[in-house]
Amino acid sequence: MGTFTKQIYRYTHPRTMRHNENLWPYVKIQRNDFGAISKLSYKRDLIPLLDLSALKDSFEGDALLTATGPSIKKIDFSKLSDLTAVGVNGAWHLNELVNFSIYIIVDMLFIDKKTELLKQIVDNKDLILFTTMHGVVKLVDNFSLKNIKCKLSIIEDKCSQIFKPQISSNEIYSTFCSQPQISFLPESKNIAFNYEIRNGVFDAGTVVYWALQILSFLGFKKIYIAGLDMTNFSSPRFYETTANMLPSFLDEKLHDIIIPAFTLASQALSNKNIDVINLSLDSAIPSYIFTKLDYRDAFKE
């Protein structure tokens, strides 16, 4: 967005709408009855979207959610080939070992810095890619619409929805407590989990938390998570070296946000009879939240 256009936006919109300043006036949207973005045009081009309503409960059985912790290197993925594979961020480096059906990217820095990897992702016509509106805009700008062959589905941060005012963390409970599809952590009600992702997903500092809300909505009944280490944050992810690693801010959020959020996710998913198995034995996420199993024990023949 040009400086002049941005100045106009800031002058004509309250500060709570500032998160939209790079979208206006190029983005036009329509929402369906559930609140999901069902129609999108960007710079006058209509962007094909996969309707979230068509995805609700469209999957069943088990999912393998691959995060990016170093413990990924200890897993023989040939033992996990029968699972529907879901990747986040740099997990695409496993694509020769894992046949991803679903992908989730909500980190805009990752899109900015990992162009070559994103090119492979958007070129996969069989893949469903969940990303934010800002993610869609970046992908179209970087690759052009004609080169995006994957199926795009927009997910929104519930507290920063497009063309709606931002909700601060201390307003989460008072704003959303009347919505029955949202669960709250009793001791910290600014942490929430949404079963109904068509009207937004709650953030908790990690894309895995987004993924758990999405996979619940899609209908999976058991979720195996690989690479959910949450330790040694100064060490490279499984696909990185010390020379090319992107920064991680997870250590700043681990105890105050991430562990409480996963505690809530465990309760919310259990209430829907969804099991979560953490395949990282050394994970900082305690076993009372998600059961820890070595992949060899989890998938004994």
Image (spheres, rainbow, N blue to C red):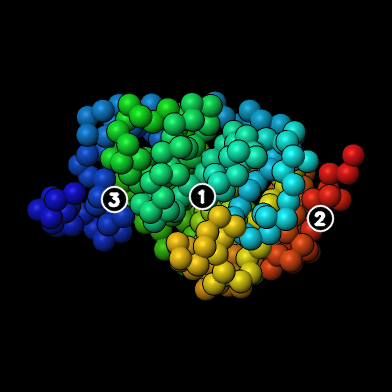
| Residue type at tag 1 | Asn
66 or 218: which is nearer to us? 66
Q: Is residue 20 left or right of residue 38?
A: left
Q: Residues within 10 Å of mark 1 (few under 14, many from 20)?
A: many
| Residue 20: numbered disc | 3
Q: Is residue 235 left or right of residue 149?
A: right
Image position, residue 75 (x, y; %)? 73, 51
Task: Answer yes or no: is residue 52 visible.
Answer: no
Check disc 3 and report its element: helix, strand or loop.
helix
Asked if disc 2 and disc 3 are in contact, CB closer than 8 Å, the reply is no
Residue in the image at 77% along x and 62% along y = 281
Q: Amino acid at mark 3?
A: Asn
**Is the C terminus in the top left, top right, bottom left or bottom right quadrant?**
top right
Q: Kindly indicate the quadrant of the structure image that contains residue 109.
A: bottom left
- The mark nearer the N terminus, 2 or 3, is 3
Q: Is residue 225 visible?
A: yes
| In this picture, residue 35 sits left or right of residue 287 | left
Return the x and y of residue 165 as percentages of the image width and height.
34, 53
Residue under the image location 40 percent in, 35 percent down: 37
**Label disc, if present, on residue 294 of the rendered structure:** 2
Distance in Å between CA atoms under marks 3 and 1: 23 Å
Sooner in the amino-acid sequence: mark 1 or mark 2: 1
3D distance between C-alphas at marks 1 and 2: 23 Å
Residue under pointer 1: 89
The type of residue carrying mark 2 is Asp
